[in-house]
Image (spheres, rainbow, N blue to C red):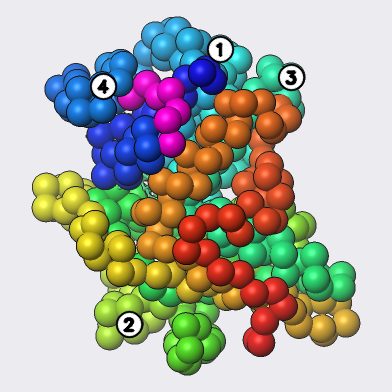
Amino acid sequence: MPPPILVYGAYGYTGRLVVREAVARGLEVVVAGRNGERVRDIAGRYGLAGRVFGLDDPGRLESEVATVAAVLHCAGPFVRTSAPMRRACIAAGTHYLDITGEIPVFEATFAEHAEAEAAGVVLLPGVGFDVVPSDCLAAKVAAACPSPRSLEIAFAGGAGVSRGTLRTMLAHAGEGLRVRRGGVLERLPFGALTRTVEIGGRLRRVVAISWGDVATAYRTTKIPDITVYTDLGRSKLVGPAGLRALSALLRVGPARRALDGLVARRLDGPSEAARARARVELWARCVGEDGTAVCGRMTVPDGYDLTARTAVEAAAKVAEGAVPPGAWTPAQAFGADFIDGFEGVTVRVPAPC
Ligand SMILES: NC(=O)c1ccc[n+]([C@@H]2O[C@H](COP(=O)([O-])OP(=O)(O)OC[C@H]3O[C@@H](n4cnc5c(N)ncnc54)[C@H](OP(=O)(O)O)[C@@H]3O)[C@@H](O)[C@H]2O)c1
């Protein structure tokens, strides 16, 4: 039996999917979180060991993670939860993975590369829908593009968002739009960049968003200009101007906290049936120094189901020792073809732009 993987935040919406997937694969898993009743509930359901601890006592955290091979961190917003867990893992010599999509968390984690290497620890953030498929697609189009200069990624589809995803987006609301230009992270007003792209067989107007690839695709490909877009679905009725106004409102602390409280009380996540019906379409376009454009396309299952599969596969590989110490993106750790083997994934590179 391989040494155990500790899933922290195991009773959250995504944590529950991750635990179910890990158990289905026969992995040895310990479930953990800060709420004793909820940890005992999920541990009992699958006959697993459960541990109850918060993230605010560094000594306790270090001793808890010291007994496992890898932590798969599923408790977000990670801007509040990742640093203490990373610190504990580096101190204990335990590998760390998470399912963040948050740009500041990626940047902070990659800044710890040398420290992780020295400690013999793997730091692998973003092993969910953010950013496994887009990171692999970015690596594939970059490899096919001569002297890549700019990268655009767009995605559309999915069954909806969970409470945790919405609360995480709220935690970053008001920060504006993050893009990469000349290798540097830049801030633009939200709604500042839109474009039209054919995704999933129809032309869509997509709007640029602050998405993890602005950090991870840069680390994977070194392409200096990176923008990520999405189809905002129903919210496109509001339009970029409306979204700018909403973003300004959410910069106001009390408004943001009121909405966060509402989301925390009211929302869980998309139903199993809705997820099973949903697909996400991704598109990427890399342009080289000489103007050559290379595009790629990918279809994947709903983001939460995909997250459970990619996160568990990544954690299993890391726990087995398949990745050298240091801080990596998913495509750096496993190669650009990592995504290809998952059920329901189709990839085309090059593809019509
Ligand atoms: N990469 C991806 O594609 C991807 C996919 C899915 C989710 N996510 C991210 O994963 C996170 C969780 O999403 P979710 O849908 O599972 O949300 P959720 O259902 O609200 O669950 C959040 C979990 O995090 C725990 N938690 C939050 N703050 C904590 C803290 N300070 N200390 C300890 N535990 C804490 C919660 O425990 P309590 O209930 O005790 O607060 C709960 O177990 C979000 O940040 C989301 O954006 C990313």
Q: Which mark is nearer the camera, 4 or 3?
A: 4
Q: Which residue is mark 1?
A: 92
Query: Looking at numbered disc 3 in the image, what kind of residue is underneath it?
Result: Ala
Q: CA distance from mark 3 to mark 1?
A: 12 Å
Work out whether residue 212 can be spotted. Answer: no
Mark 1 belongs to which amino acid? Ala
**In 3D space, how far apart are the residues under numbered discs 4 and 3 (Cα atoms)?**
36 Å
Q: Which residue is mark 4?
A: 47
Instruction: Please state which of the two labelled residues, at mark 1 or mark 4, is closer to the viewer.
Output: 4
Q: Which mark is residue 118?
A: 3
Q: Is residue 157 left or right of residue 288?
A: left
Residue 41 point in image, percent of width and height: 17, 26
Crowdedness of circle 3 by 10 Å Cα count: few (<14), some, many (20+)? few
Magenta segment boundaries in residue numbering: 25-31
Q: Quadrant of residue 17?
A: top left
The amino acid beneath tag 4 is Gly
State whether residue 147 appears in this view. yes
Of 56 and 204, the residue lying toward us: 204
In the foreground, 123 or 260: 123
63 left or right of 160 in image: right
Magenta stretch containing residue 27, yes or no?
A: yes
**Residue 166 sits in quarter:** bottom left
